[in-house]
Image: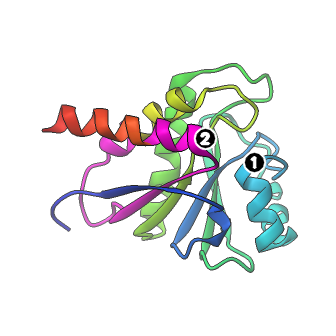
């Protein structure tokens, strides 16, 4: 694959998207109780959460993959960007995003949807979470295992503005 990864922002319910994998925030125990993860569980079924919890607990900065249950997405990637203590750690957040992308590559997934990891309990504000996400997406080496498209899915106008601003800053640095 040559070129670059197409990154778009979409405001809405991440569980509605027809992509290879949905990436949502998870806690170390991998229960899907808040934000986009809870929406994915509601729409995709309890079996997604059970499959995740069976793999836990895991350390912050990591990610695990499960099937997508009743979702249109084949997989759900559970990114643990924030630990139980809810301390904002940018490197830990970045590591969870890298882990998610590595899982997607290993599974040969080309179309991903990312929620803003770390905002579900207010640990990161949307602008900081978006900057980390866009920064990590911009560091992905473009090769046969990298995603072709990434949709950053936002839950409201504040997150949408933050994601669009982070993308605009990234484009200015690349140009």
Dot 2: within a 10 Å radius of its alpha carbon, few (fewer than 14), some, or many (20 or more) residues?
Answer: many
From the top left corner, tell me how far across and down residue 154 is, in percent. 57, 49
Q: Which residue is mark 1?
A: 35
Magenta segment: does it hold 157?
A: yes
Q: Secondary structure at mark 1?
A: helix
Residue located 59% across and 62% down the image: 22
From the top left corner, tell me how far across and down residue 142 is, in percent. 24, 56
From the top left corner, tell me how far across and down residue 172 is, in percent. 20, 34
Q: Which residue is mark 2?
A: 117
Q: Quadrant of the N terminus?
A: bottom left
Judge whether 121 appears above or below 41 on screen: above
In the image, 150 versus 156, the foreground residue is 156
Circle count: 2
From the top left corner, tell me how far across and down residue 18 is, in percent. 55, 76
In the image, 127 versus 23, the foreground residue is 127
Q: Which residues are magenta?
A: 135-163
Magenta segment: does it hold 87?
A: no
Sooner in the amino-acid sequence: mark 2 or mark 1: 1
Of all residues, the one furthest to the front in this rendering is 157
Q: Classify residue 106 by image quadrant.
A: bottom left
Q: Classify residue 14 by image quadrant.
A: bottom right
């Amino acid at each position: 694959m040559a070129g670059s990864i197409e990154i778009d922002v979409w405001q809405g319910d991440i569980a509605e998207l027809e992509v290879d994998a949905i990436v949502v925030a998870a806690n170390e125990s991998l229960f899907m109780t808040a934000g986009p993860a809870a929406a994915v569980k509601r729409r995709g079924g309890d079996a997604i959460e059970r499959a995740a919890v069976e793999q836990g607990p895991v350390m912050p900065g990591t990610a695990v993959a499960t099937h997508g249950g009743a979702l249109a997405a084949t997989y759900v990637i559970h990114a643990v960007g924030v630990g139980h203590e809810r301390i904002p750690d940018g490197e830990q957040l970045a590591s969870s995003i890298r882990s998610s992308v590595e899982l997607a590559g290993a599974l040969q997934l080309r179309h991903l949807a990312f929620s803003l990891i770390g905002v579900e309990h207010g640990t990161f504000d949307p602008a900081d979470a978006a900057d980390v996400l866009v920064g990590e997406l911009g560091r992905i080496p473009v090769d046969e295992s990298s995603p072709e498209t990434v949709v950053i899915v936002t839950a409201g106008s504040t997150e949408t503005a933050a994601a669009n601003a982070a993308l605009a800053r990234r484009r200015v640095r690349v140009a």
